[in-house]
Image: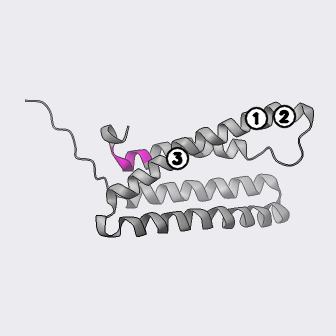
Amino acid sequence: MKTQYGPRHQATTCWPAGRAPRRCSSSSGGTLTAQARWPAANSAVLLGAGTAMVYPTFMAAIVDVAHPAWRARSVGVYRLWRDAGFAVDAVLAGVVADAYGIRAAVWTVTALTAASGLVVALRMYETHPRATAAR
């Protein structure tokens, strides 16, 4: 898909699609009873599918826009902010859930995810050349 559409298209279309299975899979936690094992296994599969869609896409987009001299540093900065986002997101979701309930926490995370996708769609430039019509 990257060679046909370019990294910006992937980052704005595959990322929300990849986050949906990840968000669905995060609802199964804690101690599992015999009845909850299959839903938990299905959630693990969804988490893996979501990660498999998202992570290579972002790494390819970063490598495409980064100059070779600072490519390694840009990948490191991306991973730093991604991992920090996981930690901050968990704390923020817990605080919002305690104050306003689980539904508000889920909508807060959803809004932040959509906002960051919008920032990528508006700020990231396309590196893939447009295909010209055959003559």
Give, as a single range, the part of the protein colored magenta.
Answer: 6-10
Secondary element under disc 2, as helix, strand or loop, is helix
Image coordinates for residue 58, horizontal then vertical, percent: 46, 52
Residue farthest to the left, as pictured: 135
Q: Are marks 2 and 1 in contact (CB under 8 Å)?
A: yes
What residue would you read off at disc 2?
37
Of the pair 92 and 107, the residue shown nearer to us? 92
Residue 116 among those drawn in magenta = no
Mark 3 or mark 2: whose residue is earlier in sequence: 2
Q: Give the residue type at disc 3.
A: Val
For the C terminus, which image quadrant? top left
Residue drawn at the location 61% of the way across and 67% of the way down: 84
Secondary element under disc 3, as helix, strand or loop, is helix
Q: CA distance from mark 2 to mark 1?
A: 6 Å
Residue farthest to the right, as pictured: 33
What residue would you read off at disc 3?
54
Image coordinates for residue 101, horizontal then vertical, percent: 83, 57
